[in-house]
Image (tube, rainbow, N blue to C red):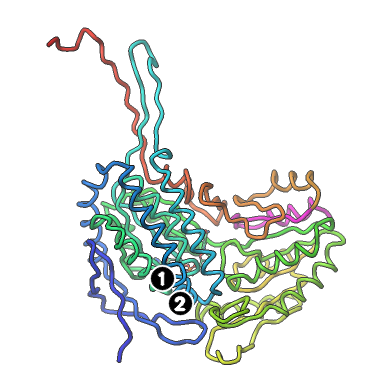
């Protein structure tokens, strides 16, 4: 029997796509085919956009207090379905069960934050800005907006955008990653249960054709994107050339500086979690550790132990600390890059290539890997690996380390481990990255703060989450009013 062919959610119902091509959705720990996902044609995007545009007429007039009631219901459904959703994420994404629960928690946080939209979307005003003249700024929704999301956080990243978009009165279309469509289908089955009016949220599965149809559609007002830097650049240029607002989050290569005065035991533990958590497939994973002065030997020894002893396996099995990477192409790419790093002179201190998990011999596993003595000017020092590989570099002073942090095209995250407040301030002040961690390994902003990538990690102005989300999905209208008494009709 053929595998289940996944449906799109358009106009409040689950619809079969007319796609000519379907892709297999795999469990990367077992290589088992879980389902098939359609590469929906542009015409289906067009249908969703038309439906959204019609739904917008009433949705924008629905009071914001009523709009957020659906989000309160959604939050409860996410809590009630947390276990099911976490298992789906683990099975199609490869990460551990605890990591799946963690990402859903961060998603729920965004739903909760967007429940505050009645306050967050308020404008401001002045009475008598000139004599007898009042002025006010109000925020209005844009209309039809869309998001295109990556494979690595299917239970969280759509929620960086969807709750804010609909709470502010927009109608929202999601084109999720074709690698993890089952998690999104589960999210949309919960959204369906909230009773949201038809057309307010819609799901169109697909690949490039669906993305291009969204980017070119004249009725789509804004595009939110998260994925790799080359595609983020492409989406940003095409969306903005078509007159749309765009916020496009890209790739990363995150440096972490370790000072000799850091609490080394805690630092090593946090660094191992950051570099190898989610098998390194996290845009905020530590991927370069820069030790300063005497930190070098003790950190190198400790992180090598932590890497070698990490338990790798199927994410639903007890005690597993790291799961598989997403697919065979990623596995080949990552192992190829480890080899390329070695050819450039790095020492493969812990080698995660060519290892198998007992009972999961078909799975796409790469074990934790440490590249020591990486030349800061080498290609591997600057290339996003997006796998469980930590590169080690060394600096003599904090100034030199900060220069190494800043000598790269990405600016998603930079972290520092120290017990010295002055050094912490110097670091925070100088680094060219938008998410900074001091004694933190994954500096992921909470939902009330913008997810602030810089440089080639972000294209746009307003970031995802929190107040930026509210601003991104609304446009400001400024009204100046004069109502002289003598003009009033007398009754
Ligand atoms: P990706 O760029 O391959 O895909 C992202 C989305 O773009 C998917 O929905 C995909 O279908 C679509 N897409 C892919 N190729 C396309 C093309 N040629 N034209 C139009 N659309 C296309 O990214 P991925 O492999 O799914 O995710 C991993 C990447 O995402 C990493 O680089 C990671 O750093 C980045 N990421 C960034 C953040 C952040 O917040 N900055 C968060 C998570 C992931």
- What residue range appears in magenta? 395-418
Of pointers 2 and 1, the one earlier in the residue sequence: 2
Element type where label 2 sits in the image: helix
Position above or below: 130 against 256? above
Looking at this view, name the residue that lies furthest to the right: 294
Does the magenta segment cover residue 44? Answer: no
User: x, y (%) of residue 340?
Assistant: 66, 78
| Residue 277 horizontal side relative to residue 329, left or right | right
Q: Residue at x 52, y 64 (%)?
A: 103
Point out the image quarter for the N terminus. bottom left
- Label annotation for residue 183: 1
Q: Quadrant of residue 95?
A: bottom right
The front one of 400 and 289 is: 289
User: x, y (%) of residue 180?
Assistant: 42, 73
User: x, y (%) of residue 173?
Assistant: 32, 59
Point out the image quarter for the C terminus. top left
The span from disc 2 to disc 1 (Cα, nearest Å) is 8 Å
The front one of 53 and 159 is: 159
User: x, y (%) of residue 436?
Assistant: 64, 51
Q: Which residue is mark 2?
A: 92
Q: Are marks 2 and 1 in contact (CB under 8 Å)?
A: yes
Q: Residue at x 77, y 59 (%)?
A: 258
Check disc 1: other Cα within 10 Å, few if <14, some if 14-19, many if 20+: many
Q: Quadrant of residue 361?
A: bottom right
């Amino acid at each position: 029997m053929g595998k289940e062919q996944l449906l799109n959610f358009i106009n409040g119902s689950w619809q079969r796509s007319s796609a000519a091509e379907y892709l297999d959705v795999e469990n990367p720990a077992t290589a088992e085919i879980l389902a098939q996902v359609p590469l929906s044609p542009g015409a289906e995007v067009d249908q969703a956009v038309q439906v959204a545009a019609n739904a917008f007429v009433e949705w924008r007039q629905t009071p914001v207090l009523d709009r957020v009631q659906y989000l309160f219901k959604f939050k409860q459904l996410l809590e009630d379905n947390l276990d099911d959703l976490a298992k789906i994420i683990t099975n199609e994404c490869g990460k551990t069960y605890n990591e799946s629960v963690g990402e859903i928690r961060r998603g729920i946080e965004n739903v909760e934050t967007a429940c505050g939209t009645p306050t967050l979307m308020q404008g401001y005003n002045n009475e008598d800005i000139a004599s007898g003249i009042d002025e006010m700024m109000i925020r209005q929704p844009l209309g039809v907006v869309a998001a295109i999301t990556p494979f690595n956080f299917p239970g969280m990243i759509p929620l960086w955008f969807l709750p804010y978009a609909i709470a502010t009165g927009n109608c929202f279309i999601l084109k999720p990653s074709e690698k993890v469509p089952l998690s999104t289908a589960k999210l949309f089955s919960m959204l369906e249960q909230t009773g949201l009016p038809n057309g307010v949220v819609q799901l169109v599965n697909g690949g490039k054709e669906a993305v291009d149809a969204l980017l070119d559609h004249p009725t789509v007002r804004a595009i939110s994107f998260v994925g790799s830097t080359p595609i983020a650049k492409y989406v940003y240029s095409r969306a903005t050339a078509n007159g749309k607002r765009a916020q496009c989050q890209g790739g990363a290569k995150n440096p972490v500086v370790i000072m000799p005065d850091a609490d080394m035991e805690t630092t090593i533990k946090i660094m191992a979690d950051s570099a190898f958590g989610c098998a390194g497939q996290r845009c905020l994973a530590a991927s370069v550790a820069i030790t300063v002065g005497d930190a070098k030997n003790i950190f190198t020894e400790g992180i090598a132990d932590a890497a070698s002893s990490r338990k790798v396996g199927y994410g639903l099995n007890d005690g597993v600390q790291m799961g598989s990477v997403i697919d065979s192409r990623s596995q080949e790419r990552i192992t190829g890059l480890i080899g390329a790093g070695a050819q450039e002179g790095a020492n493969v201190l812990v080698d995660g290539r060519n290892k198998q998990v007992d009972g999961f011999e078909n799975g796409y596993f790469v074990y934790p890997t440490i590249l020591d003595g990486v030349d800061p000017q080498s290609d591997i020092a600057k290339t996003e690996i997006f796998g469980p590989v930590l590169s080690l570099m060394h600096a003599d002073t904090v100034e030199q380390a900060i220069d190494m942090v800043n000598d790269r095209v990405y600016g998603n995250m930079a972290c520092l481990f120290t017990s010295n407040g002055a050094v912490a301030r110097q670091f925070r002040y100088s680094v060219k990255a938008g998410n900074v961690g001091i004694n933190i390994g994954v500096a992921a902003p909470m939902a009330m703060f913008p997810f602030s990538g810089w440089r080639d990690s972000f294209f746009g102005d307003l970031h995802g989450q929190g107040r930026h989300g509210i601003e991104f999905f609304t446009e400001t209208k400024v009204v100046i009013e004069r109502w002289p008494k003598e003009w009033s009709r007398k009754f």
